[in-house]
Image: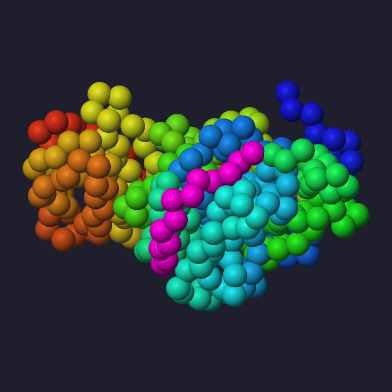
Amino acid sequence: MKRVPPLLAFLAFAACWLHPAASRAGDAGYAIQLDGIHGYLGCDLPGAIRDCGSITLSAWILPAGPAGELTSPEPRGQAAVGLGFHFGLSAGKIFCAKGTGAGGYVVLVGATSMAVGAWHHVAATFDGTVMRVYLDGLLDGVRSDASPIDWADLPEVFPPGQSNYPSPAQLFIGADKHNDLGGGATIPDFAFYEGDIDEVQIWNRALSQDEIDLYRRISLTGTEPGLVDYWKFDEGSGFIATDQVAAAGDLALYPGATWIPSTAPVNVTGVGPLDARSGSRLTAYPNPARAGTKILLECSATGTANFSVFDLSGRQIARPWEGRVTAGRPLEISWDGRDQAGRRLPNGVYLVRFDSQGARLTTRIMILR
C-alpha cells in the first residue's frame, strides 16, 4: 500500500475537514472544484506514464478563469531541462507542452478561446510525430514535431548546487511546479487552475478524433485498451480520488480542492462492456433518458447493420436506423423515445439491439420522463 507522507496526509485531512462531503451527486456523479489559489490534487508520478511515447490527456472542465495547468505529469527537474507532457489553459485556449530534455518545451496552443462558466471537453495528444489539441470533440490545433517526450528524472542535485524539483517526481491535477518556494519539494507553486474538473484521463496512445468525441460523452469502465490512469471523482467525500485503472495513481486532495456534484454533460452509468466475442460495444446516453437518447457504437467489423428497440416482452417497437458501419469508426445515432408510429413511449425499460453480419449486441435503456 502506498504511504502518504504525514505532512501531506494532514493537509489533505484539513482540506476535507474544511470542505465536507458534497451534497447529492448530479447526473454525472461528482467533480472536483479548485480555488485557483493553492488547491490541487497530487501523487508520486505513476510509472506507467513514463512508458508513454504516445499520449492522450483529456478532461471535462468548467473554468472560472482563463489559465492554469489541468494535468501535469512532472519528472524531477522538469523546469530545468524540459521534461514530461503538460496540458492546461493559456489565455482561455487549450495548450500542451512537450518536454524534450533540451532545455525547453515544444508548445502547441489551440485556436479557440473558450468561455468561462460553461463546461468544455478538452484533450491533447502526441502520436510520436504530431501534437494535437481538441475542444469539445473538434480539432483545435496541430503542430508537427517528432522529438520524443523525455520522462527521465534529473538527479536530486545537478549540476552542483542546483536542486531539482519536484522531488520525487509528481503528478499534479490543477497546478504546476517549477521551484521550491518554501512549500516543500513536492508542493506545486504556480499555474493553479480555478474551476471545476471531472473525468480526467491519461492514455498511452494518441486517440483519434472519433475516439475523443465518443469517449467524452460516457464514463468509462477503466479497462479500455491504452487507458493508464482515469479519475472519475465520484467518491464525493474523503481526501483520496481513486484511479480507476491503477492504485499507484490514487490522488490526494489538498486545501482548496473541494468535492461538488458534477453538472458535466457525461453519463456515469451508460457505458457498456466490450463484447468479448465481437470486440464491439454498444452504449446508450443519457440513461435514464428523459426525452431522447443517443446510441453509440464501437464496431470491429465493416458491413450492413441496423438498430432496433424492443419492449421487455420482445415486441419490436422502433427501428431508429439502418445502414452501413465501418470497423474502427464510432457511430452515433439519435432516438427520440418514440415508436414506429411516432407515439411517445411510456416510462419503463427497453432493449436496444444492434444487428450486423458479424455481431449482435444488446443494451438496456430506461425512459423516465
> From the viewer's perspective, is residue 191 above or below residue 3?
below
Is residue 123 a member of the stretch shown in magenta?
Answer: no
Q: Nearer the viewer, residue 190 or 227?
A: 190
Q: Give the colouring mode of the picture.
A: rainbow
- The answer to whether any part of residue 276 appears in the image is yes
Q: Nearer the viewer, residue 230 or 21?
A: 230
Is residue 142 a member of the stretch shown in magenta?
Answer: yes
Residue at the spot x=75%, y=62% of the render? 190
Percent x, y for residue 304? Answer: 8, 42
Residue at the spot x=41%, y=63% of the render? 142
Q: Give left or right: position of 140 versus 42.
A: left
Quadrant (top left/top right/bottom left/bottom right) for the N terminus = top right
Residue at the spot x=85%, y=44% of the render? 160
The region drawn magenta spans 140-152
Percent x, y for residue 216? Answer: 43, 53
> From the viewer's perspective, is residue 171 above or below residue 32?
above
